Amino acid sequence: MSEGNPLGFHRRWILLKPPLRPDSQIIAAYRREVEGHNARVLLLGVTAELADIGDTTVAVDISKKMIASAWPGDTEKRKALHGNWLDMPLEAREFTAAIGDGILAGIEFPQYQTFFSQLAKLLLPGARIALRLYETPEPGETVTMVRDQTMRGKIAGFHAFKWRLAMAIAAETKQAAVPVSAIHRRFQREFPDRAALSAATGWSLDVISEIDAYDSKPMIYRFPTRRELLAHLPDSFANPRFAASGDYELAERCPLFVADIPS
């Protein structure tokens, strides 16, 4: 999942940890869920850690800059294509699995039908999808709860905090779509003293300043509840379920959503 300018994001990527960046346990969860379905994998996005999940892998990303900066390079077993997930430049019925990390955060609910229809068109009978989610829990937290937990030092990682803040905004507004500029504004309001925040959490001021990448940016992320996701899943997918993606901080809100194309 990209945050802001692709090249700027790529420079920050090496500093990121779960829940934003896949680690060994998240990769293992993907491998576990697509085992037996990994002959030809469609990767949505150019997440380098997932580039070799399949015996062969084809990645699709809408950003040429992300492909140039984040993709580890084409080989005989993997390649990246420039394209839109809602209209992918691929032949029908050629993949045994489709995977993507946090990608639904970038897709609007009205586009879910088109997105899942694209997958259904490209996946072979018996194929599997595994998509890691950023899921707003039910009942959700309030921003006040997140602030209090933060200032008591109960949230270990800054990026887990950032996602909890965004999900609390989604829960309070009852809207899965959260503009990143709104995350920044609410952060500024709730945490006006960054030195005090640093002292309470142990996060450096440099780490905290990463929130400024959201300042006045146009991106909108979506943090659906499990119920909202299932309500938008078309009938072309069977046996929808949720699988653990590890035990890292916030993993309980980042499950793999798994479903199958009927044989």
Image: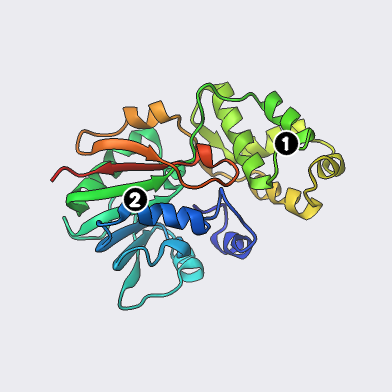
Q: Residues at badges 1 and 2 in contact (C-beta under 8 Å)?
A: no
Q: Is residue 49 above or below residue 166?
A: below
The residue singled out by tag 1 in the image is: 154
Q: Secondary structure at mark 1?
A: loop
Quadrant in the rendering for residue 89: bottom left
Q: Is residue 70 above or below residue 217?
A: below
Residue 136 picture location, percent across and down: 51, 31
Q: Nearer the viewer, residue 15 or 1?
A: 15
Q: Amino acid at mark 2?
A: Glu
Distance of label 1 from label 2 (alpha carbons): 31 Å
In the image, what residue occupies the spot 49% across and 40% down?
134
Quadrant in the rendering for residue 243: top left
In the image, what residue occupies the spot 63% across and 61% down?
12
Q: Nearer the viewer, residue 18 or 165?
A: 18
Residue 216 picture location, percent across and down: 64, 43
Residue 11 is left or right of residue 120, and the answer is: right
Q: Secondary structure at mark 2?
A: helix
Residue 244 is left or right of residue 33, and the answer is: right
The residue singled out by tag 2 in the image is: 33
In the image, what residue occupies the spot 25% across and 63% down?
40
Q: Is residue 59 above or below residue 263?
A: below
Residue 148 is left or right of residue 121, and the answer is: right
Residue 150 is left or right of residue 263, and the answer is: right
Please identify the residue farthest to the bottom as the structure is shown. 76
Quadrant in the rendering for residue 198: top right
| For marks 1 and 2 on the same chain, the one whose residue lies earlier in the sequence | 2
Residue 21 picture location, percent across and down: 54, 55
Sort mark 2 into few (<14), some (14-19) or many (20+) by Cα contacts within 10 Å: many
Q: Amino acid at mark 1?
A: Lys
Residue 242 picture location, percent across and down: 38, 38
